[in-house]
Image (cartoon, rainbow, N blue to C red):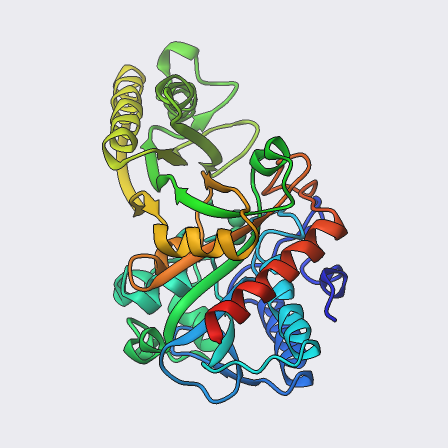
């Protein structure tokens, strides 16, 4: 059996939790761990054109039953978001073998690269590149905070940027994809269930607001003479809270003053808005309201603002027949929606896709406190093994 504890020392964020980002030394460490675990089980490991890692039980082939998740984290992330799905997948293979099960279809465990977008700002990079949901030239030009492009980072990790993009062969191979994930809310707690299946994912996206003003001296510049982009950014943060009504969510979790000095009026501020709602119209309405407020605040302060959509994904409704089939296979576990994005959400537009959730006692996620009880993780692994056996028979 494989344990999440194996990864406890990898990519530790000195501020708390983990900082595991795609195409870094930490990513290579995580890949080496995955390869070791897969090879120990006699699974054949390959990396696809977009840097996603695949471990095959049997010959790779079309119509496979595929499970897995991601190993990267948000900055300061928890131990479960992503790795639980990978560990559960490997352990489910063990469980199936213990039960003498031999899949009639090819079966694979996949690790998608840079799901969180923690380094390059764009979520689900591995799955969106593989499915063509993001253009390779757009993705390859993305830069991290140090100015390194995705193309440079990928090349340094052995992925040829010239081959990145929609991968027909990989897509043909996926007959059904099932991702197990820690729940990122308290739905299963409220339902009194250790495991559930996903029904839907909120529409969601990321927008960058770039405010420009005038850099100047914090002591020598009278208040009336300032063009401070931080004021416009602050008004935008408040507007996000006001705009997110009726179940919508709007978050500013990242804000970057340039150059960033205590005694310096910023010359510019970059701010990122994460907005989510039940459908595209409501998500766009939130972004529109925040953009209007940002433009007003920028004008009032003598600044400018430029808004760029960095990523967007419409509402996902998981295949109802598959969802109900898996829920029934698991003895009638509940189905529940989520506000979190997943590679499974990207794949749902291309192939039969489902998700299993494991109870999270506090609902906290994207934070070091993220947690699931060992017994619930074990129940999730058993559920995943049952589902894989059902699908691959
Ligand atoms: C990823 O977990 C997201 O929902 O942004
Ligand atoms: Mn996440
Ligand atoms: Mn995740």
Q: Residue at x 66, y 83 (%)?
A: 41
Is 114 above or below relative to 291?
Answer: below
Q: Is residue 41 above or below residue 383?
A: below
> Residue at point 64% right, 85% down?
39
Quadrant the N terminus occupies? bottom right
Q: Residue at x 38, y 73 (%)?
A: 174
Residue 43 in percent (x, y) is at 59, 84
Q: Is the residue 188 above or below the residue 322 in the image?
A: above
Does any portion of residue 270 appear in the rendered image? no
Q: Position of residue 35 (x, y in %)?
A: 61, 79
Residue 240 location (% of width, % of height): 39, 23
Q: Residue furthest top?
A: 224
Closer-to-camera residue (350/291): 350
Q: Is residue 375 left or right of residue 166?
A: right
In the image shown, does 95 or 270 lie closer to the viewer?
95
Number of dots carrying numbers: 0
Answer left or right for 326 relative to 142: right
Query: Going 63% across and 87% down the picture, which residue do you hit?
Result: 42
Instruction: Look at the image and tell me whether residue 390 can be seen.
Output: yes
Task: Find residue 232 and report its image quarter.
Answer: top left
Asked whether 17 or 152 is in front, the reply is 17
């Amino acid at each position: 059996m494989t344990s999440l504890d194996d990864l406890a020392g990898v990519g530790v964020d000195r501020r708390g939790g983990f900082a595991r980002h795609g195409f870094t030394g930490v990513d290579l460490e995580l890949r080496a761990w995955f390869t070791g675990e897969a090879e120990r089980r006699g699974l054949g490991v390959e990396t696809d054109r977009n840097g996603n890692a695949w471990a095959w039980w049997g010959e790779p082939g079309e119509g496979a039953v595929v499970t897995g998740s991601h190993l990267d984290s948000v900055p300061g992330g928890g131990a479960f978001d992503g790795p639980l799905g990978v560990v559960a997948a490997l352990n489910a293979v063990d469980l199936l073998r213990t039960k003498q099960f031999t899949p009639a279809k090819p079966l694979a465990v996949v690790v998608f690269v840079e799901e969180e977008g923690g380094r390059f700002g764009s979520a689900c990079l591995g799955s969106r590149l593989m499915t063509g949901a993001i253009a390779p030239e757009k993705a390859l030009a993305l830069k991290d905070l140090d100015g390194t492009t995705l193309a440079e980072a990928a090349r340094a990790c052995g992925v040829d940027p010239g081959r990145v993009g929609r991968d027909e062969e990989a897509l043909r191979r996926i007959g059904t994809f099932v991702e197990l994930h820690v729940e990122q809310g308290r739905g299963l707690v409220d339902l009194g269930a250790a495991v559930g299946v996903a029904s839907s994912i909120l529409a969601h996206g990321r927008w960058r607001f770039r405010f420009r003003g005038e850099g100047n001296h914090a002591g020598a510049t009278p208040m009336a003479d300032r063009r401070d982009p931080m004021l416009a950014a602050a008004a935008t943060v408040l507007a996000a809270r006001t705009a997110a009504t009726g179940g919508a969510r709007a978050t500013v979790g990242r804000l970057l003053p340039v150059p960033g000095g205590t005694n310096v009026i910023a010359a510019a501020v970059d701010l990122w808005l994460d907005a989510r709602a039940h459908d595209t119209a409501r998500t766009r309405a939130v972004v529109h309201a925040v953009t209007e407020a940002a433009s007003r605040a920028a004008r009032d302060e003598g600044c400018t603002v430029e808004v760029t959509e960095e990523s967007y994904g419409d509402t996902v409704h998981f295949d109802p027949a598959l969802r109900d089939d898996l829920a029934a296979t698991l003895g009638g576990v509940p189905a529940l929606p989520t506000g979190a994005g997943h590679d499974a959400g990207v794949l749902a537009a291309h192939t039969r896709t489902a998700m299993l959730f494991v109870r999270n006692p506090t609902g906290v996620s994207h934070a070091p406190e993220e947690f699931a009880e060992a017994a619930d993780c074990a129940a999730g692994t058993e559920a995943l093994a049952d589902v894989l056996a059902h699908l691959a028979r």
